[in-house]
Image: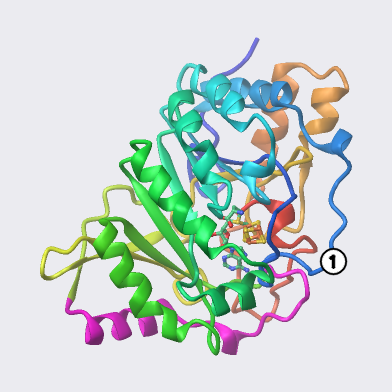
Amino acid sequence: MPTFTPLLDSLGRVHTSLRISVTDRCNIRCFYCMPETVRFLPREEILSFEEIERFVRVLAPLGVNKLRLTGGEPLVRSGLPKLVERLAAIGGIEDIALTTNGILLEENAVALKNAGLQRVNISLDALTEETFRRISRRDGLDRVLAGIHAARAAGFQKIRLNAVAIKGITEAEIVPLARFAREQQMEMRFIEFMPLDADDQWDHDQVLTGEEIRREIESAIGPLVPAPRPDPSQPASDFAYGDGGGVIGFINPVTQPFCHDCNRLRLTAEGKVRNCLFSTVEWDARAVLRGGGSDEDLAELVRDCIWNKKPGHGIDSDQFVKPQRAMYQIGG
Ligand code: SAM
Ligand code: SF4
């Protein structure tokens, strides 16, 4: 007999938001996320759409109402709109979003909208081809820009542009990105570089902080005032332009951790459940899904995972242990 208690951790944080990685593959190679040469998971290890759907069907009655599809690059998984359609049909799921690098968005935007996708976040770290290539080790900025326009044309209202900011690389991109987002009437979000790169090159000195970026934007564009925070669990601190030119957000996991309000859990492409990006422990949902386990077994596994969530990631503490997996293997 299933029990419908919410997904609580030992500190009382209620978990309602699930990030689902649908693949570890990607069509570019951002240095902060993936190694240059990479061996992806064999296909049979990746959860099928049926398995992902079952996982969400078990979690929805436990209070999970918000989904985000990610990866790797979710749009390299063929038939993604079909998964969106299946997930949108699950009772209790109120919001489905996608995080994408945008390269394959032009050809997929309409199908995703029709399938029931509500929101799109598109990663855009640079507006110059040279910096784009330096980060992603591939060409493709024109495809990303085409994807952004296609998302708007397909009718997505809330389109966010996400930029990882890296000292020594993206300073000159900050103001042009902010201006571009204002012109497009989209929300720009700057994200601090986190120690989740595959090459173990992360260094505190490479973190261009949200505070530094905000000051730069204020001096180039104009004053920013703190915007209301309708969702306390949102990772971004939002600011409004004083001239009414929209909203801009800063995700500062390194300098201003937001762990105390975290409501997120993650499912990796091969079916491991994680209670934090920085977790060093995982719970194997695929073993339950493929081993004849019941829905209650699955729910129990997730409850155990959430209950054991740590108070915070501790990036700045001496005890910090970098997870063995890089971002593309977890799902950002
Ligand atoms: N491929 C998609 C994309 O790039 O949008 C989805 C997956 S990606 C892992 C999700 C987000 O994580 C992207 O916005 C990406 O820029 C961000 N990201 C990846 N590695 C990061 C790191 N080391 N620090 C901060 N953000 C990172
Ligand atoms: Fe691919 Fe996204 Fe990672 Fe860049 S951040 S390598 S686009 S998965």
Q: Which residue is pictured at 62% across the width and 54% down the height? A: 276
Q: SS for tag 1?
A: loop
Question: Relative to residue 224, is residue 33 depicted above or below?
Answer: above
Left or right relative to 321: residue 12: left
Left or right relative to 236: residue 2: right
For disc 1, the neighbor class at 10 Å (few under 14, some 14 to 19, many from 20) is few
Q: Nearer the viewer, residue 1 or 26?
A: 26
Question: Relative to residue 225, is residue 88 depicted above or below?
Answer: above
Question: Relative to residue 102, is residue 244 depicted above or below?
Answer: below
* Residue type, numbered disc 1: Thr
Kindly indicate the quadrant of the structure image that contains residue 8: top right
Q: Which residue is pictured at 59% across the width and 62% down the height? A: 140
Q: Mark 1 = which residue?
A: 37
Task: Give the magenta part as a residue range.
Answer: 196-223
Q: Position of residue 211 (x, y in %)?
A: 36, 81
Q: Position of residue 294 (x, y in %)?
A: 76, 16
Left or right relative to 72: residue 40: right
Q: Is residue 312 magenta?
A: no
Q: Position of residue 330 (x, y in %)?
A: 70, 52
User: In this orientation, does residue 245 appear?
Assistant: yes
Q: Which residue is pictured at 32% across the width and 58% down the height? A: 187
